[in-house]
Amino acid sequence: MPPLTRWFIKSALVFLVAALVVRLLQTANSLTAGNAYINALGPVYFHMFLVGWVTQLVFGIVFWMFPKYSLDHPRRSERLGWWIFWLLNIGLGLRVIAEPLNSIHPATGWGWLLVLSAVLQWLAGMGFVANSWGRVKAK
């Protein structure tokens, strides 16, 4: 298993646990008076689960298991693969911070950090498509 795949899968597992902890906090918070920051974690839970867990798991497995691009570059560009990994995780990390803060304090500029996080995740997605497209071919 290539190192990049291991990083994607281990990061996916971390985000799965983190998403489940966030959901547990949200559930416990709904039974008490409630903390505004925890109440604002709904979109964070969704992104940690879908982008952090599912998307990273898919990206890692695709990088490893898709057909070889060529003998010289079986996984196409490993360098682009690392860029994808970091863009996706930095974007997701920014979202985890900015989403609840923007929800609680919408007039303070946290929305721009959300935009940046979305752009980074979009770039990661486009990089993934560019790096994987040539590996999808007929037998």
Image (tube, rainbow, N blue to C red):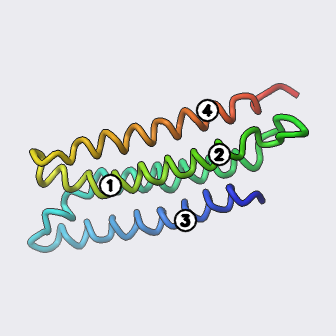
Q: Which-is-in-front pick, marks 2 and 1?
A: 2
Compared to residue 127, the image places residue 20 above or below, namely below
Q: CA distance from mark 3 to mark 4?
A: 23 Å
Q: Secondary structure at mark 4?
A: helix
State the residue position of label 3.
Answer: 13
Q: CA distance from mark 3 to mark 1?
A: 16 Å
Q: Position of residue 54 (x, y in %)?
A: 53, 51
Q: Residue at x 17, y 45 (%)?
A: 109
Q: Indicate which disc residue 81 carries.
A: 2
Q: Secondary structure at mark 2?
A: helix
Q: Quadrant of the N terminus?
A: bottom right
Q: CA distance from mark 1 to mark 4?
A: 24 Å
Q: Position of residue 5 (x, y in %)?
A: 68, 56
> Residue furthest toward the top?
138
Going by the numbered disc 3, the residue's amino acid type is: Leu
Mark 4: few, some, or many residues within 10 Å (few <14, many ≥20)? Answer: few
Earlier-in-chain disc, 3 versus 1: 3
Tell whether label 1 touches label 2 (CB within 8 Å).
no
Compared to residue 96, the image places residue 65 above or below, namely above
Q: Indicate which disc residue 44 carries.
A: 1
Q: Secondary structure at mark 3?
A: helix
Going by the numbered disc 1, the residue's amino acid type is: Val
Q: CA distance from mark 2 to mark 4?
A: 11 Å
Q: Quadrant of the C terminus?
A: top right
Mark 2: few, some, or many residues within 10 Å (few <14, many ≥20)? Answer: many
Going by the numbered disc 2, the residue's amino acid type is: Gly
Tell whether label 4 touches label 3 (CB within 8 Å).
no
